[in-house]
Image (cartoon, rainbow, N blue to C red):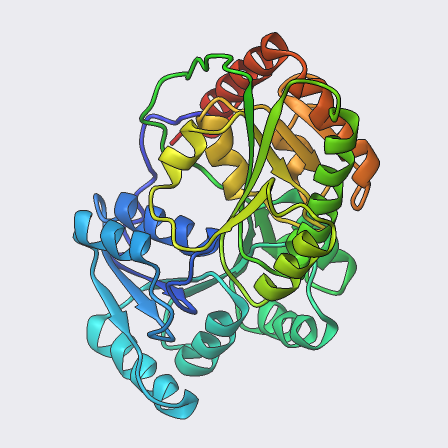
């Protein structure tokens, strides 16, 4: 994603609404707020949030720091639809960009033809059939377009009945305000994963990969720690897996973390074992912090991670291959630094906002 001299300003658009399902700790939420902060330099921007919980602290701080105008809808779904319809009319919103299935559907029910442009979002390369069929009708009949953050997402939804000509791929971007990081080799290796504790992220494979890695390095004088940073409904299941495999001295779960940059600065390798993805914000953040990446070939991961250049790309659920890739990085600080530098160069040249 190369920088352009400046945005195209559409004279027909004065006020933009961005809708979100909630302020949960996800990539869509982060990208929405980042876009709002940039668009407000050129338009009046209003962020409309369907559910007032959860509210991730990092997002609240970003909203405050950038003085974003945010409105939370209240009550049950029928009341929220009425509120949104009145809000759009009162504020004179010309364009609405909706990010996630719930707010896409609710917004389409609320505004109908009352807004000049309603654009939906595709944030992943998989979706259950019930939700997908509803969104297909909204996309084909109601939306002027959908923006997919990944090529794999456009391919998946086009194959499943979404009008392909109405899907445009615009990858996630990231603001880079740091310089490349050089890490000292102190004999201790910290591997980190960021993300919600849900089946999609397949932490069970990550844990088994660490178990395989520890067997490979058992006789070597190495300290290995794996940190899982996030929270979610699979927390108990993941902790049980850690305990069952006897890996609690080596694997820890961190649910209350606000300083993600500090976590990544203190890491040596980033690990992603997702079964499906769009464009991973977490991998992008790891690349900004000059980390080599070990990732599964999910979504557009192979666009971010160039195999054998800034990391390794493996098949989903390949715990042995993932563990072997981690071992190669652990044994060579030179390789880690070279791949980490390649991560920073790639993210800076292609995705920097």
Whether residue 44 is situated above or below residue 324 in the rendered picture: below
Q: Is residue 323 left or right of residue 287?
A: right
Q: Residue extending furthest top? A: 334
The C terminus, quarter of image: top left
Residue toward you, 288 or 50: 288
Horizontal arrangement in the rendering, residue 68 relative to residue 162 (left or right): left
Question: Would you identify the image quadrant in which residue 331 lies?
Answer: top right
Comparing 52 with 268, the one in front is: 268
Q: Say which residue appears at 54% left-offset and 47% top-offset.
A: 252
Q: Where is residue 61 in the image (x, y as percent from the top left)?
A: 24, 52
Q: Quadrant of the rendered structure where residue 177 is?
A: top left
Residue appearing at x 51%, y 73% in the figure = 102
Q: Position of residue 30 (x, y in %)?
A: 40, 50
Query: In the image, is 84 to the left or to the right of 195?
Result: left
Question: How far from the left and from the top, in percent, is residue 271?
Answer: 62, 36
Q: Where is residue 194 in the image (x, y as percent from the top left)?
A: 52, 45
């Amino acid at each position: 994603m190369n920088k352009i001299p400046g945005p195209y300003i559409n004279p027909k658009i004065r006020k933009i609404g961005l809708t979100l399902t909630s302020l949960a700790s996800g990539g869509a939420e982060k990208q929405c707020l980042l876009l709002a902060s940039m668009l407000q330099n050129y338009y009046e921007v209003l962020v409309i949030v369907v559910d007032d919980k959860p509210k991730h602290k990092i997002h609240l701080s970003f909203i405050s720091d950038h003085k974003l105008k945010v409105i939370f809808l209240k009550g049950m779904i029928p009341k929220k639809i009425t509120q949104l319809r009145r809000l759009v009319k009162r504020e004179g919103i010309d364009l609405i960009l909706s990010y996630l299935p719930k707010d896409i559907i609710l917004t389409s029910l609320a505004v109908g033809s009352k807004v000049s442009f309603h654009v939906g979002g595709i944030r992943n390369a998989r979706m259950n059939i019930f939700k997908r069929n509803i969104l297909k009708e909204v996309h084909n009949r109601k939306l002027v377009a959908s923006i997919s953050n990944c090529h794999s997402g456009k391919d998946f939804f086009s194959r499943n009945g979404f009008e392909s000509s109405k899907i445009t791929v615009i990858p996630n971007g990231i603001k880079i305000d740091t310089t490349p990081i050089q890490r000292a080799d102190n004999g201790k290796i910290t591997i980190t994963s960021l993300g919600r504790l849900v089946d999609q992220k397949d932490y069970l494979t990550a844990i088994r990969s660490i178990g395989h890695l520890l067997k490979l390095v058992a006789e070597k004088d190495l300290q290995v720690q794996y940190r899982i940073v996030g929270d979610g409904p699979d927390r108990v299941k993941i902790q049980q897996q850690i305990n069952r495999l006897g890996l609690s001295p080596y694997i820890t779960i961190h649910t209350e973390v606000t300083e993600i940059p500090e976590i990544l600065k203190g890491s040596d390798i980033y690990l992603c074992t997702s079964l499906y993805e769009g464009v991973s914000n977490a991998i992008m953040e790891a690349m900004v912090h000059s980390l080599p990446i070990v990732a599964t070939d999910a979504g557009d991961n192979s666009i971010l991670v160039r195999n054998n250049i800034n990391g390794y790309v493996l098949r989903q659920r390949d715990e042995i291959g993932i563990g072997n890739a981690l071992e190669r990085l652990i044994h060579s600080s030179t390789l880690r630094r070279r791949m980490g530098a390649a991560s920073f160069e790639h993210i800076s040249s292609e995705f920097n906002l």
